[in-house]
Image (cartoon, rainbow, N blue to C red):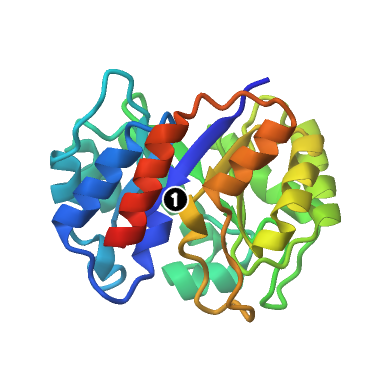
Amino acid sequence: MMIKITETARDAMQGLKQFIPTEHKIKYINALLKVGFDTLDTGSFVSPKTIPQMADSGLVLEQLDFPGSSPEIMVLVVNQRGAEQALKHPKVNCISYPFSVSPTFLKRNLNTDELGSLSTVKKIVDTVEGKLDKVIYLSMGLGNPYGDDWSEDLVVDKASLLYELGIRRMPLSDILGDATPEKIFSTYKKLIAAFPDADFGLHIHTKPSESYSKLEAAWEAGVRSFETVLNGMGGCPTAADEMVGNLSTQDLLVFCSGKNIQTGIDTNALWLAATIGSNVL
C-alpha cells in the first residue's frame, strides 16, 4: 500500500508575522526536497499586501537545488495573474487554489462569491491547461464554523462543479480542527463513491491527540492523499484552541508505520529538515 504526501511548507510559513529571511526559506525547502515527499507546497503568487510572508516565493524557487528524484512543486494562486506568474517558473509543476463550500470563507478570503470563484477557477484552468497540474481545495469541506449551510450532499454538489471544469485533485480542508472522525469518514465515503477517479486529499488542522482517530477515519473511507507540515507548525490563528495546528508529518508517518503503509520517506532527511525548520522558522 502506498500513499501520497504533500508537505505544505507554505501553510507553515504564511501566517508567521515575523518575515522569514529568503535565505532561510531556501535552506529549509532545499532540505525538504530530499525527504521524498510526492508534492512540496513551496509558496504562493498572491499580492504581498495579502500574504507578505510569501512575497519572495519567486526568489526562493530560483534557488531550489533539486536532488536526483524531486517532488512535484506546487504554489498557491488566487487569480489568473498568479497562474501566469507560476508559468514563468520552470520548476513549478502544479498550482493550487482555495475554492470553498462556504460563501463566508470566499467573501472573507477572496472577496468573491461562488460564481466569481468558479469563474476564476476556469480562467486559471484555461491558463495552465496542458502545462501545470491543478489542485483546487474544497475549503470548509468537513464542516462550517461560520453558520453557513453544510451537508455531505452540499460538498458533493460543490465537488461536481469543479469536476465539470476538469478538476480531479480536490483536497478537503478543515482549518479550525472541528471535524470529527465520524464526519470525516462519512463525507469521504460519499465523495469517493460519487467521483471514483478523483483524488480527495485530507488537509486538516487538529490537536495532536486527535490526529490518529482522524487519520484512521480518512484511511478507512479510502483517502490516499494527505497534506502535512513537519512539527505540525502553522494553523489557523482564529482557532479557539491554541493546540490546534497543521497535521504533523511525523504523526502521519507513525500512523503509516503502524499500518505497514509505504511512504517512500527518507527518515534521516526528514529529521534533518525538521531540525532546520525548528531553527529557521
Residue shown at 30%/68% (left/top)? 51
Asked if 214 appears above or below 107 in the picture, the reply is above
The type of residue carrying mark 1 is Tyr
Residue 201 appears anywhere in the view: no
Instruction: State the image coordinates of residue 113 (x, y, percent, origin top left).
Output: 52, 66
Instruction: State the image coordinates of residue 3 (x, y, percent, origin top left).
Output: 61, 28
For this rendering, which residue is in front, 266 or 185? 266
Residue shown at 44%/29% (left/top)? 266
Would you call the spot at circle 1 few (<14 residues within 10 Å), some (14-19), or many (20 or more)? many
Residue shown at 47%/33% (left/top)? 267
Residue shown at 69%/40% (left/top)? 255
Q: Name the residue under label 1.
A: 97
Q: In which quarter of the image is the C terminus?
A: bottom left
Asked if 261 appears above or below 254 in the picture, the reply is above
Instruction: State the image coordinates of residue 30 (x, y, percent, origin top left).
Output: 25, 39
**Where on the picture, by quarter, is residue 20?**
bottom left
